[in-house]
Image (spheres, grey):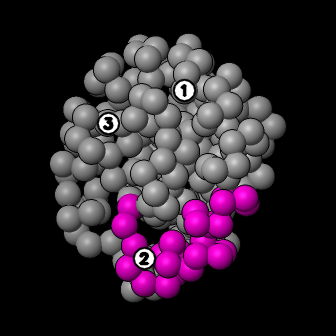
Amino acid sequence: MPKLYSFAGPLLVLVLALSFGSARGEIGSQDNPKYNSSINPKYNSSINPNYNSSINPKYNTSINPKYNTSINPDYSTAINPDYNTSINPTYNISINPTYKPSLSPEYGSWSGYYLFDLDAEPIGIVVFANSDNLLVFSPSMEWIGNLIGNSEGGFNWFSLENDWIAFAAKNSEGGYNIFTQDGEWIAFMD
């Protein structure tokens, strides 16, 4: 079963053996970076942080939690689910898909993003719970994490155990690039 795991340190390891077999997870061609080059960072340099320094946290410190403490959950309790129960699905059942099944892509229509690795392979679905909380699901529709909004328009990615494992920064065209805490680009969502 594909999962997103957090291991010791800031590394995010993606274990991929993926297939979007159900109708709920099938990706239309307009949402699939393999068929739509405008959403594929391999072919669109404006959304590729290797070619656009304004969306690369290694060059733009305002989007890098390592240098901008207002978007770093280790320094800002407002965006840390260990200290703010309103953004923690364990305590706020209105953003918890276990208690609110309509938030799960498994149960019908959903609004959000598809999550892709850097080879444009699908690795998950990201569903809007509200404007500041997104829920991350594996291709098998298992809830595996939460993205919590920050003041730069990005998100911090937490495991279900509230371990901060990555962050998402806006790209230049409405999607997001996913980075490790060290600023390594590992995935994107569109």
Q: Percent from the top left, x then y, of residue 114?
A: 40, 61
The structure residue drawn at horizontal position 55% and vertical position 22%, both measured from the top left corner, is 70
Q: CA distance from mark 2 to mark 3?
A: 23 Å
Secondary structure of the residue carrying tag 2 is helix
Mark 1 — residue? 71
Quadrant of the rendering where the N terminus is positioned: bottom right
The structure residue drawn at horizontal position 35% and vertical position 26%, both measured from the top left corner, is 55
Answer few, some or many: residues within 10 Å of disc 2's Cα (few below 14, many 20 plus, some between 14 and 19). Answer: many
Q: Percent from the top left, x then y, of residue 118?
A: 43, 46
Residue 171's tag is 3
Q: Earlier in the sequence, mark 2 or mark 3?
A: 2
Q: Nearer the viewer, mark 3 or mark 1?
A: 1
Residue 25's tag is 2
Q: Percent from the top left, x then y, of residue 69?
A: 59, 18
Q: CA distance from mark 3 to mark 1?
A: 17 Å
Give, as a three-letter code, the residue at label 2. Answer: Gly
Q: Which residues are magenta?
A: 89-112
